[in-house]
Image: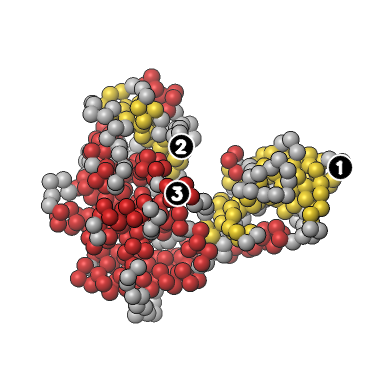
Amino acid sequence: MKNIMVVILWLLGVSAATPAFADEASPEQLARLYLDFMAQNSRQSEALWPGFRLEDKVHLFSYGGNVWLRQPGGEIIQDNSVLESVNLQSGLSINFGFPQYQGQPGVLIQLESPNIQFSADTKPTDLAFLIWASNGLHEAFHFYAQSEWRVLEEGRRYEGEVFPLSLDARYYRLQLFDALMAALAQPEQQSLHLSHAAYWLQQWRQIAPNEDRVGYINDLVEGSAKYVELAAGARILSQNQTLLGYQQILTQYVHDYYQQRKMLGGWTAEAENIGALAGILLDSTQEPYVWKESVMSGMLPLDLLLNRVKPVPPVERKDNKQKKPLQQMLAYYPATQAKLSQLLLNAQDVRVPLLVMPSVSDSSSFIDVGDVRSGFYVVPYQDEMTQAYLGMSAQFSNLSVSGSPLLDVPVQNYCEGIEAATLLPLAFPFQREGQYLVFNEAEVHGTIRVSASVVDGRTLYCAMN
């Protein structure tokens, strides 16, 4: 059953990089702009993607203690009585959730920023507004459409970048994105640009097989959602246009979108934007309903686009201006790679004792440690891939972990009574006092009650409640 789900967006919407306006839009004005946008797209949501039904949903806009909403087929009203039930209280600038309103499923956007970064003369067709508002469709597509895809129930979705971190892999994916953009912008040379795209896809898959394997679900989910987001913005701009007019406006909108929101690479951006461009190109080469049905059954848009295209290497450019900003953006790679490498060495070294705790990932936050970027990563462990965490801050019993690298495994057979587990290699000083381990390190502090055993020559400490 679908319960309210909070989607936290760190870099979207009202951001510190956007200047405040002296004549900023009022909360009610922005609410009406957004709810009108959602209403227009709700009427055509199933044309955007089969099975994506928003016309029967309530759309809600919450800001500063006020809630505006529109029920299916109704007018915009203010109903502050529901504020408590929809207040997500994340402390971040923008959130999406999916609550019930009077028994009807809903789509909620909640702003928690101290001011609105749109001017009073904002129009519903302004590029900045369309980019911002279409994130509501992106998240609603995840929740209401993709939750019905059987293929997503069968595969595990990993979060974060994949070990080993590879600057070349990021560069190849960026080149792939550029080739797809060129194919969209220059239809007369589309076959050539698609052959270059096929080449960069081949290169990436050769040097980053782990990424290719574990990134499949992420590419499928995020690429199709970004496609819906872009197509929705173009449909708003192309009302009453012919199909040819829509395609021309879509091409221009995609170009303008990426001029405003630079695609410099990175794991999440690649999954979204490469898949979105592949979908947009498929619309002009294949029957949209057919290729979307294939995606829902598990085919990546990129593979549908390029599976019959012969890879052709492009003419090599001597002065590539993309590598330097990519290196700057990924400056955390060397230190982070070293930290992950040490974690894996310690996890595999039988001389290093292993603390096994119930998974703490659902109640954690992250802090950056030096040059290492904190967060989720995907690493090989015992012939499988699993989650690793760097910079995690978590609490279990009387034990505080603050920045220590950890592994999460969905199923383990070390300790009875613990299924999903967090593993902490104890490659640092600690004391054992009876049934307790005592830690006094900067990253690990406090005590934890354990049962000890030796398995295959390795000391295991199983956490006890």
In this view, 424 is above or below 63: below
The kind of residue on which mark 2 rests is Val
For discs 1 and 3, the disc positioned in front in the rendered view:
3
The kind of residue on which mark 3 rests is Leu
Picture coordinates of residue 170, whole percent (x, y): 46, 65
Q: Which residue is mark 2?
A: 6
Q: Which residue is mark 3?
A: 152
| Residue situated in front as seen by the camera: 37 or 227 | 227
The answer to which of marks 1 and 3 sits earlier in the sequence is: 3
| Residue situated in front as seen by the camera: 343 or 403 | 343
Seen at 81% across and 49% down, the residue is 453
In this view, 69 is above or below 301: above
Q: Find the residue positioned furthest to the right.
A: 434
Q: Which residue is mark 1?
A: 433
Q: Quadrant location of the N terminus?
A: top left
Picture coordinates of residue 335, whole percent (x, y): 60, 62
Measure the alpha-carbon separation of dots 1 and 2: 42 Å
Measure the alpha-carbon separation of dots 2 and 3: 19 Å
